């Protein structure tokens, strides 16, 4: 192996390690940010679901049918 090849191997390994470190750091920052986004989205979605289910039940109770001609 020439010194150039050794250098290229070391450089490639170093780049790979740097990419792995970046990916890990990115994943950690994503993980720390995700719960906030998830809870916000979940509260919105659950509120919407609750309202829609509630309105359907109220609609059914009022005796109106879905197929009003």
Image: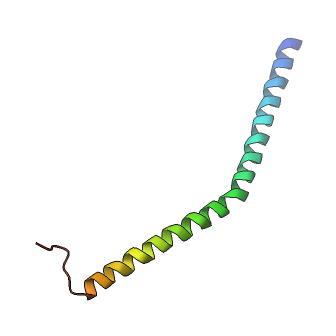
Q: Is residue 4 visible?
A: yes
Q: Is residue 1 visible?
A: no
Residue 29, placed above or below residue 7:
below
x then y, percent, for residue 24: 75, 46
Residue for point 14% across, 74% down: 68
Residue 62: quarter of image: bottom left
Residue for point 32% across, 78% down: 56
Residue 66: quarter of image: bottom left
x then y, percent, for residue 45: 49, 68
16 relative position to 40: left or right: right
Q: Quadrant of the C terminus?
A: bottom left
Residue for point 85% across, 18% down: 6
66 relative position to 5: left or right: left
x then y, percent, for residue 40: 60, 65
63 relative position to 6: left or right: left
Residue 1, placed above or below residue 55:
above
Residue 48: quarter of image: bottom left
x then y, percent, for residue 3: 89, 13
């Amino acid at each position: 192996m020439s010194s150039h090849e050794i250098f290229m191997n070391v450089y490639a390994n170093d780049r790979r390690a740097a990419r792995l470190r970046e990916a890990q750091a990115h994943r950690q920052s994503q993980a720390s940010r995700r719960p906030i986004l998830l809870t916000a989205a979940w509260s919105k979605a659950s509120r919407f679901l609750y309202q829609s289910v509630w309105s359907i039940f109220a609609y059914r109770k009022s005796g109106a049918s879905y197929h009003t001609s």
